[in-house]
Amino acid sequence: MQIEELWKSLEADAASGHSGTGGWLLRLARPAADHPLFVGLELSSGRRAILLQLPTDYMPSRRLWPRSKGLEPLAVALDGNAHFGVALKDSRFTDVFTALAEDLCRRVTETADPASQARAFLGQLARWQKFLSASVEGLNDETQRGLWGELRFLRDHLLSWTGAAAVKAWKGGERLHQDFQFEGVAIEVKTTLAKMPQVIRITNERQLDHTTWSALFLNVIALDVRDAGGETLPAMVASLRDRLTADAIAREQFEDELLLAGYLDAHTPRYIDRGYTVRSVTFFHVGPGFPSLIEADMPPGVGDANYALSISACERFKVKATELESALAGQTPPRAKRRGRA
C-alpha cells in the first residue's frame, strides 16, 4: 500500500471503533522492510503522523526538532517503546504531508541502524522545513518557468557533458548566485517570454560577476507558453528522473534539489496545463566589458541591484555551446557552498 492508502485504512479502522495502542493506531510504513517506521493516527484528534521507533538513547533532543508551519514534531511512548515523529496539524498541508511521509520512508529504509535512522529522519525534516516556509500552493508562473529552464539545461546539455557531476552542480534551489556551479566555472540560466527586444531580469550584482570565476556563462532560453501542448514542468521532471534511474546517488541529489526549489509531485495538477516550447537557445561568455553590474563597481552603501538586461546588448559575447562544454572539461562541483543570493 502507498502511504496515503495506509492512512485511509487507519481512518476506516478508527471509524469502526478500533481502540489502538496508547491512543494511536499504527501500521508499518513498509510492511516488507525491517525498519520500525510507522504510519500513525492519533485517535483523540484524528491527526495523521509518521513515527520512527527508536531506542531511548537515540531519541533526538528537543532542541534539534525542526519547527514548521502545518506540522508538529512529537515524541510518544507506545507499548513501552519510544517513538519520534511528526504529525499533521493543519489540513491544508495534507498533500505535502503525504509527500513528506513517502520521502521519510524512502530515506529511513535505506539506513541500517538506529543512529543512521534518526539522522536521516531529522535531516529530511530539516529539508522539508525550508519547503514548508514557502507557499503551500506551489510555484508561481515565473518560478515554474525558471525551474523548467534550469532543468532543460541540465537534461539537454549538462548531463551529457559531465555525467552525474551535473546534478551535484545544480544549485537552483539553494539560492546561490548562479544556477550551476563547478570549481571554477558557473552557469546562470535565464528564461524569457519576451519577443524583440528580448530582456531578462538580473536579480543582484553577484549573479553576473565574472571576477569571482575562472569562467562564467549565461544561458538564455526564449520560450512560448502553451495552454495545451509543449513540454510541461512535470514532464520535464519525469524525463530527468528516467535519465537518472541507473544512478541512485544522483537521483537522490536531484530529488533533494527539487524539494529545495519548491517542486512537489502533489502540485502536478497545477502545472500540467502549462507547457513550453523553445524559440531559441543562446549562450554568452560573461567577461570584461559584458553589460552587467558587478559588486566591485557598486558605490559604497549601494547593493541588492535588480535590473533588466537587453539580450541585444550582449551579442558580441555570444558563444557556441561547445565553448561551454570545453570549459567544463575536468571540472567538479565545489565542495563548499558559495554565499547565497542577496
Image (cartoon, rainbow, N blue to C red):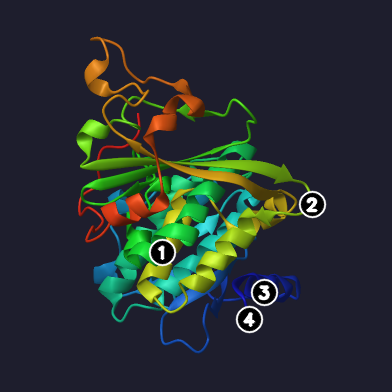
User: Residue 335 bears which disc, if any?
Assistant: none
Residue closest to the far front: 316
Asked if the residues shown at circle 1 and circle 2 are in contact, with their CB atoms under 8 angstroms apart, the answer is no
227 left or right of 199 in image:
right
In the image, is residue 228 above or below residue 200? below
Residue closest to the far right: 228
Task: State the residue at coordinates (37%, 23%).
Answer: 291
Of marks 1 and 4, which one's residue comes earlier in the chain? 4
Q: How many numbered discs?
A: 4
Quadrant of the image occupied by residue 203: top left
**Residue denoted by label 2:** 228
Label 2: few (<14), some (14–19) or many (≥20) C-alpha neighbours in 10 Å: few
- The amino acid type of the residue labelled 2 equals Ala
Between 242 and 49, the residue placed more toward the observer is 242
Q: Secondary structure at mark 4?
A: loop
Label 1: few (<14), some (14–19) or many (≥20) C-alpha neighbours in 10 Å: some
Quadrant of the image occupied by residue 49: bottom right
**Residue denoted by label 3:** 5
How far, Cα to Cα, is label 4 from label 2? 34 Å
